[in-house]
Image (tube, rainbow, N blue to C red):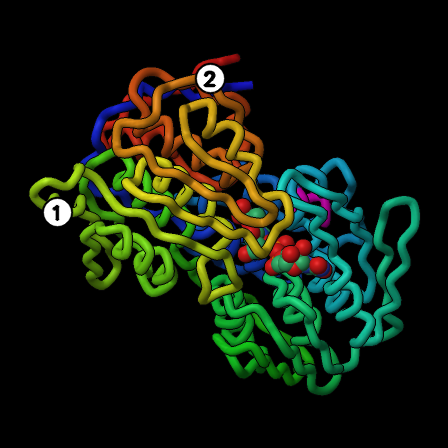
Amino acid sequence: MEKLLVEGGKALYGDVAVSGAKNAALPLLAATLLTPGRHVLGNVPDLRDTRTFLRLMEDLGVTHERQGDTVTIDATEVRDAEASYDLVKTMRASVLVLGPLLARRGRARVSLPGGCAIGARPINFHLAGFEKLGVACRLEHGYVDAEVPGRMRGGCVYFDIPSVTGTENLLMAAVLADGVTIIKNAAREPEVGNLIDMLNGMGAQIRGKDSDRLTITGVKSLRPANCRIIPDRIEAGTYLLAIAASGGEGRVTNCQPAHFASLLAKMRQAGFGIQEGGDCVAVRQPLVNAGAPPGWGAADIKTLPFPGYPTDLQAQFMALMTLSNGISVITETIFENRFMHVAELQRLGADIRIDGRSCVVRGQGVKALTGAKVMATDLRASSSLVIAALAARGRSEISRIYHLERGYERLVEKLTALGATVGKENE
Ligand code: EPU
């Protein structure tokens, strides 16, 4: 296992380009299972999760070729194989093969994911939705066995909570069903929109993009896709927060600022200068008023489905708030156990108290944190530790960085280009 070494206390300056979105790449890769032929996907990030997903697709008989960030997928053959527990436990998004496999082969067998570091994360909404389309789902020996005699038929699906991968799975199942499917209280995340664009480009008929009501009129067949993955809004936000917390200034490029407008609003509220321009965002340190301490103010956040503040940027914003000149309340409403980073941030000197689903963060000013040994627990928790370690005085060691490699492409290279002193070492 590798660990990340960070020599903190250096302000970051410069430009950093954002890669394709992990959480868009995974459903778009899954959607290529829908129809035979050669599909071309652009801006596919080379991450542990995308590699794992492509391995799962290989098990299903689908081959691929990568040239730069373009991945060509040959989905001519799709075998009757299962997504095993060994694979699904390393990447829950494997459940995204359920929808397209049911649409293409009428059958799918996928291991039930089980809980993970951030919460229980059930897939009951996915299964209840499939059942509305005529699928019989059985749970046996830890596996979901889903089968539909003939083609699926359109139905009306309502999500109690807008589920991102639930919406994506149902979309992929419904595009080839007989008749019309309506998804109510659908997730509106940009990654869902990217999938809708890809499916419509393949000949699907989906209306209601960016709204919470999607209408899918089933079609008889689809053609291979040619689509580009949207920029990763969570990666963009993470770098913006890293630059800000380090006391530096810079730009995040190749991104879509509208996709993380909630973060930009909160950074402005904390006093940062945020300038949006086409596909980039620049961040400047707050102006210091005479007599006031240097640094930034506090802002509260509450995580919500899009367009609310994203849960995937909660931990990173908390890292910034540990260094503010005020008190911030951070409320997590999406996942029940997404404060694993708190104890690690405390090791760096942060003053945070957990109170149920909220954290009270007492900012202690820009120089508050000091380097320490900490442990990464999940992907986004790890990136908050990187932000805190970059801002902390002295050396930090972050162990178990395989979590980071799941979702941040060329992290060390990108941070080094911004002037950070970071490196990997074997534990
Ligand atoms: N939920 C259920 N039952 C379900 C599905 C969801 O109760 O069948 C609940 C969840 O427990 C949660 C809420 O609904 O409380 C929303 O969960 P959602 O289904 O939207 O999450 P997801 O689709 O499993 C995706 C991202 C996550 C991101 C969440 C929320 C992918 C591959 N994963 O997960 O990304 O946090 O949406 O935005 O798209 C990450 O990248 O680090 C990550 C965890």
Nearer the observer, 259 or 33: 259
Disc 1 element: loop
Is 54 situated left or right of 313 in this image?
right
Question: In 3D space, how far apart are the residues under numbered discs 2 and 1 (Cα atoms)?
Answer: 33 Å
Q: What amino acid is at disc 1?
A: Leu
Mark 1, Cα crowd under 10 Å, few <14 / some 14-19 / many 20+, is few
Q: Which tag, 2 or 1, sits closer to the chain's start? A: 1
Q: Which amino acid lies under the numbered mark 2 shown in the image of this protein?
A: Lys
In the picture, the disc for residue 287 is: 1
Q: Residue at x 64, y 71 (%)?
A: 171
Q: Secondary structure at mark 2?
A: strand
Q: Which residues are magenta?
A: 56-60
- Name the quadrant of the N terminus: top right
Of residues 115 and 414, the one drawn nearer to the viewer in this rendering:
115
Q: In the rendered image, which residue does mark 2 sit on? A: 373
Where does residue 344 sit, x and y in percent of width and height? 50, 27
User: Of circles 2 and 1, which is in front?
Assistant: 1
Whether label 1 lies within 8 Å of ligand 1 gets the answer no
Q: Is residue 108 left or right of residue 300?
A: right
Residue 60, image x, y percentages: 72, 49
Image quarter for residue 420? Answer: top left
User: Residue at coordinates 12% horizontally, 43% vertically from top-left?
Assistant: 288
Residue 178 lies left or right of residue 287; in this view the side is right
Residue 50 percent across, percent down from the top left: 55, 44
Name the residue nearer the viewer: 81 or 343: 343
Location of residue 387 with respect to 121 vertically, above or below: above
Question: Is residue 233 shown left or right of residue 323?
Answer: right
Residue appearing at x 36%, y 56% in the figure: 263
